[in-house]
Image (spheres, helix red, strand yellow):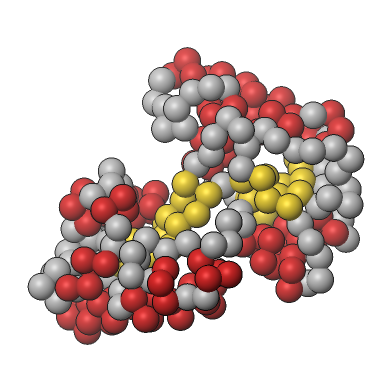
């Protein structure tokens, strides 16, 4: 069993790298909220099952920022030249910029995309680093010159583990959702057993244990009543 985010599920399907799923085996798929089924990257969930989801946002070290951060446009403020950290990912970076400009994050309009490209080039002097882990975000926003990041709520958990308190802002222009999915490689020698394992992971009690471990939002509707109220109501 592998885990792929939404955009890479679509790529893997196009390249015929994933096994088609048998829902007579994965019966616990019924626990997945309808909001997360049959999405554009995998119609009818023929090849993938939703696992975790979350938002893209702005991560702030409040000790290095002098005013409230409320919108994507704040990343372009001259206050943050050389201080912005960005997670690797064209999809999210472009989506964020489109939202800032008032467009659909999924726009394929060439004029709107050209505007986003120009706006991102304006951001270039502000970018301290592109990163691939929350550890990098925390290090750059504490020991390094970074003050603010395009990142995820997981960066806060990593900061907490390191003894720091960061803020996470969902900008007023709106945001982009991300999702991770369970899938099975097409060349797997154990496709049936992999499906049995996915079915096990979709049990509400197992989903609750996963949530208590990684703190990421789950599309499994049976989980919420099995975790502590403090965790269930944590924004």
Task: Please state which of residues 47 and 190 is positioned toward the viewer in this rendering.
Answer: 47
Which residue reaches farthest left?
Answer: 24
The image quarter containing residue 48 is bottom left
The quarter of the picture where the C terminus appears is: bottom right
The image quarter containing residue 143 is bottom right
Q: Residue at x 38, y 81 (%)?
A: 206
Measured as percent of width and height from the top left, residue 182 is found at: 34, 67
Seen in the image, is 181 located left or right of residue 152? left
58 shown above or below 102: below
The image quarter containing residue 70 is top right
Which residue reaches farthest front?
Answer: 229
Which residue reaches farthest top?
Answer: 111
The quarter of the picture where the N terminus appears is: bottom left
Seen in the image, is 42 located left or right of residue 131? left
Seen in the image, is 143 located left or right of residue 43? right
Q: Residue at x 46, y 80 (%)?
A: 209
Measured as percent of width and height from the top left, residue 229 is found at: 53, 71
Q: Residue at x 81, y 65 (%)?
A: 164
Q: In the rendered image, is residue 145 in sight?
A: no
Q: In the rendered image, is residue 169 in sight?
A: yes
Q: Residue at x 29, y 62 (%)?
A: 32
Measured as percent of width and height from the top left, residue 111 is found at: 47, 15
214 shown above or below 8: below
Seen in the image, is 51 located left or right of residue 56? left
Measured as percent of width and height from the top left, residue 71 is found at: 67, 33
């Amino acid at each position: 069993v592998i885990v792929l985010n939404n955009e890479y599920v679509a790529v893997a399907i196009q390249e015929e790298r994933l096994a088609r799923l048998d829902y007579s085996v994965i019966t616990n798929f019924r626990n997945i909220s309808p909001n997360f089924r049959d999405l554009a990257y995998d119609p009818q969930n023929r090849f993938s099952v939703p696992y975790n989801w979350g938002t893209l946002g702005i991560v702030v070290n409040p000790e290095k920022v002098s005013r409230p951060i409320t919108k994507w446009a704040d990343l372009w403020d001259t206050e943050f030249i050389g201080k912005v950290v960005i997670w690797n990912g064209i999809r999210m970076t472009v989506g964020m910029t489109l939202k800032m400009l008032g467009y659909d994050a999924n726009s394929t309009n060439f004029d709107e995309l050209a505007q986003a490209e120009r706006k991102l080039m304006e951001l270039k002097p502000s970018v301290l680093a592109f990163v691939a882990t929350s550890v990098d975000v925390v290090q750059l926003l504490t020991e390094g010159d970074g003050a603010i990041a395009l990142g995820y709520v997981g960066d806060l958990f990593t900061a907490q583990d390191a003894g720091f308190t960061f803020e996470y802002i969902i900008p007023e222009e709106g945001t982009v959702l991300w999702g991770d999915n369970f899938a099975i490689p097409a060349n797997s020698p154990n496709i049936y057993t992999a499906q049995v394992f996915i079915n096990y992971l979709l049990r509400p009690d197992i989903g609750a244990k996963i949530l208590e471990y990684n703190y990421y939002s789950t599309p499994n509707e049976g989980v919420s009543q099995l975790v502590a109220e403090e965790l269930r109501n944590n924004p």
